[in-house]
Amino acid sequence: MTQPEEEHAEEIMSTQPADIFTPSSPSNLTEWLIYFIYHVRSKPKYRPSGYWRYVIGVYKNLFLSFYFNWFAIVTSPLSSLAFLISYPIISGILLAFELGLKLFMDGLGGSHLVKLISRDYGSGFGMINWGAPELLLSQQTSSLVRTTIPSLSSPPAEGTDHRHRVFDISIAQAMTVLASLVYERDDDKVTEAYRSVADLNAKSEQKDHIESSIRRLVWESEAPIRHIAHHYGLQFAGVTELKSLGGPFCGLYWSNEYPVIIVSFKGTTPTNYSEFLVDATLQRTDARAYLFGSAHEGFYDSLFPAHSDDEDGKDPYFAIQTAVVERAKQIRSALGTNDPVQLWVTGHSLGAAMGSLLFARWLKCPEDIEPYCCLRDCYVLGTPAVGDSDFASMFASYSNAPLKRTSTLWRVINRCDIICRIPPGYNNMTIGHYAPTTDFFNYSHIGHAVEITHPILNPRPLKIYPSSYQSNMKVSIVPGSWKGIWSYGKAKKDFLRSTNKYTKTQDYGYSAWAKNALNRLGIDPISLVESFYPFFIRDHIPIHYFKGLERARAFYNRQEFTEIMQKENETSERKLTQ
C-alpha cells in the first residue's frame, strides 16, 4: 500500500470518537459550578440527518437574505420570487426522492437488483458506466491513454503569443476516460471500513487487527480502478473522502515512467442521496479564505475546511495538496530528475465542480505545489456553475497573472447537457457588475467553454468561446498525439473478447419477481432503463462526451489532411512555375 492510500485509510480511521475524559470529583462550590458548566456543555449535540441539515441551511439562508435586505422584494422581485418558490420546491422534491430511493433500494431490494444487473449486463460497473463498459475496457481506449501520457508529461511549450491556447482532443478524451473510471470504486467496502471504525475504541484489544482490516477494505475498494488503470499504463490511489461516506472522493493517477500526475474527482452517483444534497445546495458561501468571491456552498464546503461552528474538522484540500506534493517527490526521485511534475485536473459532473475549485486554488496559490509540480490544464466535463460574478472575475484575473501563464480551464459541454446550465445565473459581466451578492441568479461560469455541437445544427463539431469574464483567446484545436480512430463497433468486439472485467458483487441470484420480469422483457435491462433518459440527461453521460469528441477528432483529422494537401499542392505549383 502506497503513501496516499495509507493517508486515505488514516483519514477514515480518524473519524473515530476521541477518548472520553472523566473529570475528578469537585471539592468546593467553585469546582461544583465549573463541573456543572462542563457537564452541560459536554453533552453531545443533536446532529440532524443530511436532509434536515440541508433544509435548515436553506431556510437559514432564505431568512438572512430578507432580514438584511428586506427591500429586495421591491428592487429584485425576480430574484426574491425565485428564492421563495425554488427552495420549498427543491426541498419537497429531495424529500420525495429520499423516501422513494430508500423504499426501492432497501425495501424492495433495488440495491441487490442494481448489483446483479451490473454484474450480468454491465461488466460490474456502476450506473454511470454500465451502459458502455467498452469505453473503459477496449484496446482502443488503452492505446489512446497510453499514447497521450507522454504529451501530458511534456512541459508547456514556450511562446511569445500569450493569447494563444491549444485544445488537445486526445487529452480531452483521455481525461474523459479517467474521469469515468474514478466512478468505479466499490463504495460498499468504504462503508464497511467506516463501520469498523466504531470497533476501534470498543475493542481496544483488537485494535491492530481492526486497523489492518480497515486498510485492506480501503485498498480493495479501489481495486477496480487500479485494475483498469494498469492497462492504461497508470497507477491510482485514493486520497480523501471529501467529508462524505461513499460519495464524491478524490484520487490521483500517475505514471511510473513519465513525470505526470492527474487529480480526478468522482461525480454524482444516481443512487447516492448525499451527493444530490451537495448538488442541490444552491446558496453561496464566502470563499475568500481559500479562493475569492462567493462559491456554491455545497461544492466549497466539501473541499475546504469548514467554519468553526461545524463539528466536521476534516481538511480535504490539505490531504490532496499533501498527497500531490509527496507523490511528485517520489516521481522525481524515481526518474532521477529535478524538473517539476506536470499536474492536471479532471472530473465529471459534481467531480467537475470540485476540480474547478481545486484548479482555482492552485491558480491563486501555486506555491502550494511548487517547485515540485507545474500546474497545467483542467479538463472538466458537465460542469455546473461554481461561483458568483466576483468569483468568476477573480478567476479570470488569476488566469492572466502573469501573462505568460498558460494554465487553462476547459469546460467541455455536450450539446443539451442540463447540468452545464445550472444553477441558473446571469452569467453576464455587465449584469454581474450591478447584481447584489445575495441575488439568487448571481452565478457565473468560469474558464473556456468547449461546446460539442449537434451535427444537424452546426457542421463544426466544436464551438469554443470564453466564459463571460475570460479574455478572448486564439484557440487551436488539434487531434493530439493519438492518430487512431475510436470505433464503437470495434470497441464492442474488443469488450466481448476481453477478460479485463472486474465484478464487484458476489451475489448469485435474482429475486423471483425480478427474474420473471427480466425473462419476460427478453432484452438488456440497462438499454431499457437508459432509453427512458431524457435527452438533456443522456447528454450528461461520459460516453456521449467521448463520442462527441471522437466526432470532432474525425473532423479535424480531415481538416488537417486537407490543409497538408493544400500546402503540398501550393509547393508543387511554385516549383513548376520556377
Image: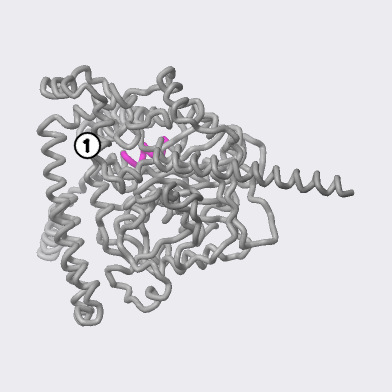
Check disc 1: other Cα within 10 Å, few if <14, some if 14-19, many if 20+.
some
Magenta-drawn stretch, dominant element (helix, strand or loop): helix
Image quadrant in which you'd find residue 292: bottom left
Whether residue 65 can be seen here: yes
| Residue 444, horizontal then vertical, whole percent | 38, 65
| Residue 12, horizontal then vertical, whole percent | 32, 40
| Residue 476, horizontal then vertical, whole percent | 60, 53
Q: Residue at x 15, y 54 (%)?
A: 52
Q: Nearer the viewer, residue 422 or 485?
A: 485
Q: Is residue 400 above or below residue 127?
A: below
Residue 9 covered by magenta stretch: yes
Q: Nearer the viewer, residue 526 or 110?
A: 526
Reading the image, the residue beneath label 1 is: 198
Give the position of the N terminus as an image quadrant: top left
Colour option used:
one colour
Q: Is residue 204 above or below residue 376?
A: above
Q: Residue at x 52, y 40 (%)?
A: 327
Q: Nearer the viewer, residue 261 or 134?
A: 134
- The residue lying furthest to the front in this view is 577
- The residue lying furthest to the right in this view is 578
Q: Residue at x 59, y 41 (%)?
A: 557
Q: Secondary structure at mark 1?
A: loop
Q: Of the residues shown, which amino acid type is indicated by label 1?
A: Ala
Left/right of residue 86 with respect to residue 108 in the rendered view:
right
Residue 138 covered by magenta stretch: no
Q: Is residue 60 above or below residue 190?
A: below
Q: Which residues are drawn in magenta?
A: 5-12
Whether residue 24 can be seen here: no
| Residue 181, horizontal then vertical, whole percent | 41, 35
